[in-house]
Amino acid sequence: MLRRNYIRIGLAAVALVALVSLGLPFAFFTALNWRFNPIPSYSDFPPPHSQAEADRQDLADLEQLLVLDRSFSQSEADAFREGLADLRTKAGMLSPEEFEMAVARLAALSGNAHTMIDPRELMARFIRAPLDLAWFEEGLYIIGAAPSASDLVGFRVRTIAGHSVEETLAALRPFISGTDQRARVMAPRYFTSPAVLETIWPDADPDQLILQLETTDGQLIEQAIPAVRFEAPNRRIYAKDWRYLTDDRADTAPSLLERNRNLLRQELENDGLYIRLNAMADDDNGPLEDQLAPVLEGAPEGGWRWIVLDLRNNNGGNYQKGLAFTRALPDALARDGQLWLLTSNETLSAAIVTLARAKHFVGARAHIVGERVGDNDEFWSEQGPSLVLGHSKIALMYATGRHDLVNGCYAMDCYWLDFFYQVAAGDLAPEIEIRWRFSDYALGRDTLLEHVRSLMRIN
């Protein structure tokens, strides 16, 4: 199988060289760009005279999602068309929140995590309780809040609008694209919006979030948090004026330090190295590939005895930025050195590619620890400009290229760069399945990192 894969890659490379030598690179790359980065087209509608007409015009443009996106199966596409037809009958009768949730539900029919309302736009039009929620082994907790609700930080969420956390997750599941793991990551954004909750439970209060909370001393209290409008970013909020549970801890795990940096490096005991990659993207510290270039330097004689690559908070980006780094990992390790790959349900897209490449190149010395990643091993991504509905301003992502990190991807629907950079890494499920415990997090400790440390002390 490996030899056959290399032959396919070689043939693709020969074909590319031949096209360039024939003077056809422009046509070749134009075709690739059209195939994987299409530009949505929009109907030239007259100004609408009613909300119903505005909704129908948006839905007419939404129909092209099936043209742009290639992840839908035939049955999923049929369900999308049926849902779209039903939504047209409700034009003008839905609130903005109900309309957006209905669009989200149609996109989610794809079953693909990248076919969804753009996370940078998701919830931007909704008022929300100013809370940051996160999952731990013990349940759902408030880990951060605006000053108006800062006294709730550290409390466990027991019910939302009178419903258990798991019941709320199940009710929202049809509106969230991707796997169950991805839905679990995305759901807390919806949990904090009373307007969203009202779309699934009409008796919910639309202006304030009603929570039953378990305090740090085990008491149950009910709290009403007024919803406000604030920026809803793609990642954790980490606003300067918000209070976070791990703020001002004297001894904090490296995974919790400098949270707005994409790359963090810290040497560990016993010739170890910790590397945290929170996104495959540039940040204020410069191009990521330039930041990664020296990160493996300074190794003890013979190489690092153990390296921890933390991808738990990595939603993806551009996997090309990690190509040289993942290639260099085997040579940076000692001959009997171990690579520990930390993953969570939030590990997505280019982070999955980086995970697979690291595992592939290091081989049997690589160990995945944590939770199942937030997408299938075989997934769809890549797109051109988002599809933006003219009146509601809902921006939708779509997927044009397939990736298969288990077997490699060589069919015509595979993303073209994968022919040159992909790997067939095998199973990406955690070798050791473990979640962050809130009892550790509250003290600034990292459950997964401490577990790996204990294994390295034993060895």
Image (spheres, grey):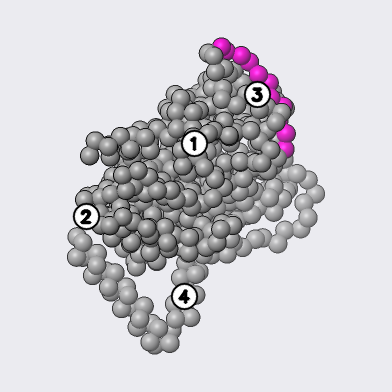
Q: What is the residue that sits farthest to the bottom in this orientation?
A: 22
Quarter-of-image position of residue 46: bottom right
Q: Earlier in the sequence, mark 4 or mark 1?
A: 4
Q: Is residue 332 left or right of residue 382?
A: left
Which residue is label 1 attached to?
Answer: 252
Quarter-of-image position of residue 152: top right
Rendering coords of residue 80 (x, y %): 51, 45
**Which of the two marks, 1 or 3, is nearer to us in this view?**
1
Residue at disc 3, secondary structure = helix
Magenta stretch: dominant SS?
strand
Q: Which mark is residue 335?
A: 2
Q: Residues within 10 Å of mark 4 (few under 14, many from 20)?
A: few
The span from disc 1 to disc 3 (Cα, nearest Å) is: 21 Å
Rendering coords of residue 285 (x, y %): 56, 58
Q: Amino acid at mark 1?
A: Thr
The span from disc 3 to disc 2 (Cα, nearest Å) is: 50 Å
Tell me whether the residue at label 1 lies in contact with that at label 3, contact meaning CB atoms closer than 8 angstroms: no
The span from disc 4 to disc 2 (Cα, nearest Å) is: 42 Å
Q: Earlier in the sequence, mark 4 or mark 2?
A: 4
Q: Amino acid at mark 2?
A: Arg
Which residue is label 4 attached to?
Answer: 29
Residue at disc 1, secondary structure = loop
Q: Residue at x 53, y 59 (%)?
A: 282
Q: Residue at x 45, y 32 (%)?
A: 445
The span from disc 1 to disc 2 (Cα, nearest Å) is: 31 Å
Q: Locate the N terminus by quadrant.
A: bottom left
Q: Amino acid at mark 3?
A: Asp
Rendering coords of residue 20 (x, y %): 40, 83
Which residue is label 3 attached to?
Answer: 151
